[in-house]
Image (tube, rainbow, N blue to C red):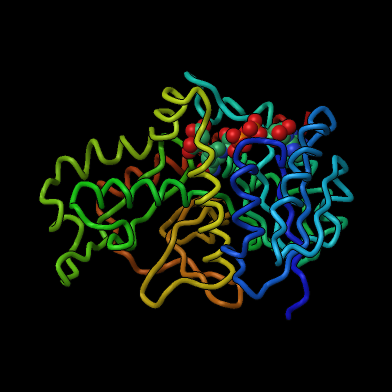
Amino acid sequence: MAEPLKVLITGAAGQIAYSLMFQVGSGSVFGPNQPLKLVLLDILPMKSVLDGVLMEMMDCALPLVKEIVATVDETEAFTDVDVAMLVGAMPRREGMERKDLLAANVKIFKSQGAAMDKVSKKNIKVVVVGNPANTNALICSKYAPSIPKENFSCLTRLDQNRAQAQVAARVGVDTQNVGNTIIWGNHSSTQFPDVSHATVTKDGKVVSVYEAVKDDDWLKGDFIKTVQTRGGAVIKARKLSSAMSAAKATCDHIRDWWTGCAEGKWVSMGVISDGSYDIPKGLMYSFPVRTKPDHTYEIVQGLSISDFARAKMDATAKELQEELAAAMEVCEH
Ligand SMILES: NC(=O)C1=CN([C@@H]2O[C@H](COP(=O)(O)OP(=O)(O)OC[C@H]3O[C@@H](n4cnc5c(N)ncnc54)[C@H](O)[C@@H]3O)[C@@H](O)[C@H]2O)C=CC1
Ligand SMILES: O=C([O-])CC(=O)C(=O)O
């Protein structure tokens, strides 16, 4: 059997982590032959809850989990980590935008970036879930300069899954029959869910989403709005933000990054922009990426961009530039 992978989950006493850690421990992310050491980090006021979660994880008696450490010490948590799922942060409540969390959350990622820089493995892979996810991920990477920028990502897979599910329901197919949807930009209400390169497989035939849906007004209007505002709709209904679906999307994100995506397919991940599609270099922006079995990825190149798409891609990039300026202000003062 392989050496155990050290996987860190932060916000371990919170609601996303409660769904996430069982899926990771059961082998559905790194596969049935990969042993794991799980590290669960939360903050001191949550220690008792964290201890309870640790008891439950032990009681799951998962054969792949060789060791579980629950801690409130950042340095201990980040030491020698291979994969970090950075969930721990304050969630928004009804009526807030995700960027309203910036002042409260961004310093968490400054501090964790600095810890990672000192004690994690240099090839650590990081997904930031805590909101505002793109900007937090960028800040984390800025404070971990010894770790390659490509190793940092943020979660937009939940948006991709939402887009896929909306189209599947509209056309009447299973979700896996909708392929290559794209989320461009920020995990916020300016994100651009783009189906102009996506396909639907129905009755054995592969057709474009536009052809399958036959309602361009919906695809350019309510579909986009529904995906952009889905997080808020869940908060309004549940009085808590999405947790089960966020945990599932985090697993999808890391699984695909770890094992690679199928031939001809891509997935959306927030990654550092290299200037592709004229998105300013250095922003943490969601692109379609092709992941590979060696845990690398490349941004899918050469997709045609309509004027409609261009305007939306630029608007979400502009919001990310503004968020970054606000985040740097918080971090430097
Ligand atoms: N990117 C995405 O698609 C999504 C992101 N989110 C975000 O994920 C974050 C977590 O959401 P929930 O689990 O529902 O929140 P929660 O409030 O249930 O749990 C958050 C946990 O993080 C802990 N925490 C706070 N500071 C920490 C630190 N410095 N180190 C370690 N742990 C710390 C808290 O004590 C708490 O236990 C929120 O910011 C939420 O907005 C939620 C859904 C989707
Ligand atoms: O909407 C929120 O605040 C939580 C979140 O990021 C999502 O559900 O996409």
Tell how many labels. Answer: 0
The residue positioned 46% from the left and 47% from the top of the image is 158
The quarter of the image that holds ligand 1 is top right
Which quadrant of the rendered structure holds the C terminus?
Answer: top right
Compared across the picture, whether 216 is left or right of 288 comes to left
The residue positioned 32% from the left and 43% from the top of the image is 311
Q: Is residue 82 visible?
A: no
Measuring from the top left, give residue 85's x and y in whole percent.
66, 51
Measuring from the top left, give residue 232's x and y in whole percent.
43, 28
Compared across the picture, whether 193 is left or right of 101 comes to left
Q: Nearer the viewer, residue 174 or 299?
A: 174
Residue most extreme to the left: 214
Which quadrant of the rendered structure holds the N terminus?
Answer: bottom right
Measuring from the top left, give residue 4's x and y in whole percent.
77, 70
The residue positioned 61% from the left and 49% from the top of the image is 20
The residue positioned 38% from the left and 37% from the top of the image is 228
Q: Nearer the viewer, residue 89 or 177?
A: 177
Residue most extreme to the bottom: 1
Residue most extreme to the top: 95
- Depicted 291 relative to depicted 127: above or below: below
Q: Is residue 21 visible?
A: yes
Image quarter for residue 233? Answer: top left
